[in-house]
Amino acid sequence: MTTMNSIPNCNICGTQFDNIFEAVNHLMEDSGEGEIFNPKFLLPNGYKLLLGSLLHELFDNANNPEEIKRLTQMTYATLYAAKTDAGEMKRLVEEAIVHATTATMDSELEEILKGEIKDDE
């Protein structure tokens, strides 16, 4: 049985992987499908829980307890909103998703701008 600490190298190119997310993404690229593996769990009332994204975010933030708390609360709220179709909870979940997305975009933009400033110097 393969453990997460001993992910085999790619059989085709020999690439070594630090984690299973890298390995799966590499396999998807090699398969020619050109898309990221992101399984979805279908919930009532048209909601979808993006399990692949959730697990990857939890993994990426393993050393950030505040982010783990935020992600688990947002997931729990999504499950509740899907079950009850509560309008207010739906609004809160949507706001949390928008906030999370813009926070990521803000940090990425900041990194890009830092790189451009260093290049100009």
Image (cartoon, grey):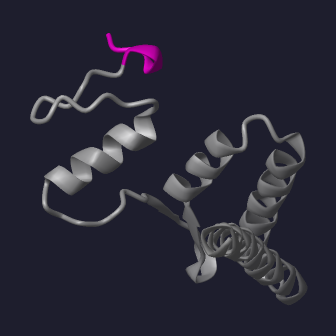
Point out the residue furthest to the front here. 121
Residue at screen point 63% across, 72% down: 112
Residue 113 located within the stretch drawn in magenta? no
Could you tell me which quadrant the C terminus lies in? bottom right
Quadrant of residue 114 in the image? bottom right
Residue 21 image offset from top left, x and y in percent:
44, 42
In the foreground, 14 or 82: 14
In the foreground, 106 or 24: 106
Q: Give the range drawn in magenta.
A: 1-6
Residue at screen point 28% across, 46% down: 26
In the foreground, 72 or 121: 121
- Left or right: 30 in relation to 109: left
Quadrant of residue 14 in the image? top left
Residue 113 image offset from top left, x and y in percent:
69, 76
Point out the residue furthest to the top here. 1
- Left or right: 80 in relation to 19: right
- Left or right: 77 in relation to 9: right
Residue at screen point 84% across, 89% down: 87
In the foreground, 20 or 104: 104
- Left or right: 76 in relation to 54: right
